Image (cartoon, helix red, strand yellow):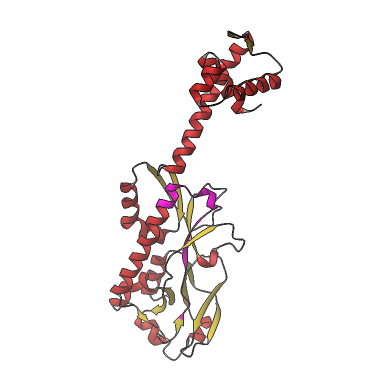
Amino acid sequence: MHLDDLAAFAQVVRHGGFTAAAGAIGSQKAKLSRQVARLENDLQMRLLERSTRSLRLTEAGREIFEHCDVIADRVEATRLIAQRTRTEIVGLLRVCCPPGFARALEQDLLPGFLARHPGVRLELHVTSEDVDMVRDSFDVMRRGASDLPASGSLVVRQFSRLHRVLAATPTVAEAHAGKTPLDLPTLPTLTFGPPGRETHWGLFQPDGRRHELALLPRLASDDGTVIVEAARAGLGIALIPLVICREALAGGELVQLWPDWRIEEFGIALCYPSKKSMTPMLRAFIDHVVPGVDRQLAELMLDTGG
């Protein structure tokens, strides 16, 4: 049984005949007749008694009309909702991100987005745990570039890459003054990134040679504030984005170690499940957040002289 046939039957009954219904909905009389005949065949019962001059509902047709009229209304309402979602910036948007990124959004990006689009309701889920976007019904989430699935199952919008530095308190730096970055696996380290995984730091010597160091950090967290505070407390040498530790460096609480060595930059991205899920609401959110975060990063780099 086809929903279109139910809708056609309802229109014929509402308008009192095939000709009137075809004119009202912009269809053809013959097409409506075929649809009603197919519906009767599927149900194996007569719904309309036809003559050359009149049309009358059978008893079964009257009962079915009461139901299919409701169904047709619901189908039309569903179509209008889908059309509105495809063309208007409205609805519920579910966003998932780690704490540090949430703080960047909360500064002015989320208030600005919601003020610009009053038809949007937003749920911001702040977590450091891995989530399944489809299973957990998220529309968009922030991920590190190293955490993106190799299968290409997610659509990715990249942010500007983050410049990272090795930083520690002056006391810790002085205690390890005779060391080089190649000694880091034997030193107390603090790493900004997803906990519970193997830690590898990519570093480049001044001559461009690359080294990948496997570490067992004293502390790993994907909340940059936690790493900065641990470094301030003298717990070890932190590898952290410059924009996160800029104030501590400017105030002398932390100093940069081995500034002639270059650290691999850190990439972050917004991800969503598929291009088919790109509604105007999601597009508006991404187009608002990505330039906004990039602008924040650029301003912070200027403030730190980076």
Quick check: is 288 in the magenta stretch? no
Relative image position of residue 76 (x, y in whole percent): 50, 29
Q: Is residue 205 above or below residue 46?
A: below
Residue found 37% across the figure and 81% down from its top: 256
Residue 7 picture quarter = top right
Question: Residue 258: horizontal and vertical position, in percent?
Answer: 42, 86
Where the C terminus falls, by quadrant?
bottom left
Front residue of 251/67: it is 67
Q: In the image, 42: left or right of 170?
A: right
Please tell me which residue is depicted at 36% across the width and 57% down the height of the picture.
105
Q: Is residue 210 left or right of residue 40?
A: left
**Side (left or right) of 54 relative to 281:** right
Quadrant of the image occupied by residue 27: top right
| Observer able to see residue 295 | yes
Q: Is residue 284 above or below residue 56?
A: below
> Which range of residues does the magenta coloring cover?
263-284
116 or 226: nearer the eye?
116
Q: How many marks?
A: 0
The spot of residue 46 in percent (x, y) is: 67, 13
Query: Can the viewer see residue 233 in this picture?
Result: no
Residue 269 falls inside the magenta stretch: yes
Q: Nearer the viewer, residue 230 or 249?
A: 249
Position above or below: 87 against 143: above
Q: Nearer the viewer, residue 171 or 1?
A: 1
Image quadrant where one finds the N terminus: top right
Q: Position of residue 238 (x, y in %)?
A: 43, 75
